[in-house]
Image (tube, rainbow, N blue to C red):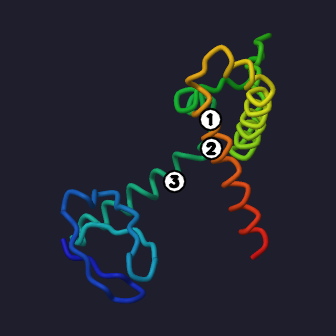
């Protein structure tokens, strides 16, 4: 089926099965205009209009107790002593909080390592080279940060 936008006159190809007898809300992708598209036959348009007016007369209250119970599981009018589910408090521990905790952990680990590095080297002499490399890298990172801060 070929449909036209009422506003910008752009044409669209839509499968015939997409537009039912009751019509369908469509939106133009070019201008954003929305309208209800009905099948092209004049006879079906008349049938649809009759059905719509009949449905409007029948449906006075859209939110009846039966509708709300069936659609949303809500029961109105009958109040029982049911406990409401307890809402859990939202965790406000975001990304930057995790980064801060990680930095504090690293600083603590390096502080402890600095305190016990002589004992570690005395008990495990092969680790002296690795510990010295680690502290050299930390010093190079300090120098790099100070240079970045200065610029």
Q: In the drawing, does residue 120 fall left or right of residue 44?
A: right
- Which residue is tagged 1? 64
Q: Residues under labels 1 and 3: Cα distance? A: 15 Å
Across the whole image, how many numbered discs are drawn on residues?
Answer: 3
- Which residue is tagged 2? 61
Mark 2 lies on a secondary structure that is loop
115 to 33, vertically: above or below: above
Q: Nearer the viewer, residue 14 or 117?
A: 117
Residue at the (59%, 44%) spot, across then down:
62
84 to 38, vertically: above or below: above
Location of residue 102 (image quadrant) = top right
Q: Mark 3: few, some, or many residues within 10 Å (few <14, many ≥20)?
A: few
Residue at the (46%, 77%) spot, across then down:
32
Residue at the (38%, 63%) spot, across then down:
49
Q: In the drawing, does residue 22 fall left or right of residue 144?
A: left
Location of residue 9 (image quadrant) = bottom left
Task: Choose mark 1 or mark 3, whichever is in front.
Answer: 1
* Contact (Cβ within 8 Å) of mark 2 with mark 1: yes
Q: Give the percent coordinates (x, y) of residue 57.
A: 53, 51
Q: Residues under labels 2 and 1: Cα distance? A: 6 Å
Q: Give the percent coordinates (x, y) of residue 11.
A: 26, 82
Location of residue 130 (image quadrant) = top right
Give the label on residue 56, or none: 3
């Amino acid at each position: 089926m070929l449909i036209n936008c009422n506003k910008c006159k752009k044409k669209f190809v839509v499968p015939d099965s997409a537009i039912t007898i009751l019509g369908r809300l469509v939106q133009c992708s070019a201008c954003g205009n929305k309208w209800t598209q009905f099948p092209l036959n004049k006879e079906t348009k008349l049938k649809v209009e009759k059905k719509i007016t009949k449905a409007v007369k029948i449906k006075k209250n859209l939110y009846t107790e039966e509708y709300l119970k069936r659609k949303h599981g809500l029961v109105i009018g009958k109040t029982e002593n049911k406990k409401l589910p307890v809402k859990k408090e939202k965790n406000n521990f975001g990304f930057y909080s995790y980064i801060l905790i990680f930095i504090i952990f690293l600083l603590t680990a390096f502080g402890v390592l600095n305190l016990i590095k002589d004992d570690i080297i005395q008990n495990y002499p092969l680790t002296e080279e690795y510990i010295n490399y680690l502290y050299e890298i930390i010093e190079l990172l300090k120098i790099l940060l100070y240079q970045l801060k200065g610029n």
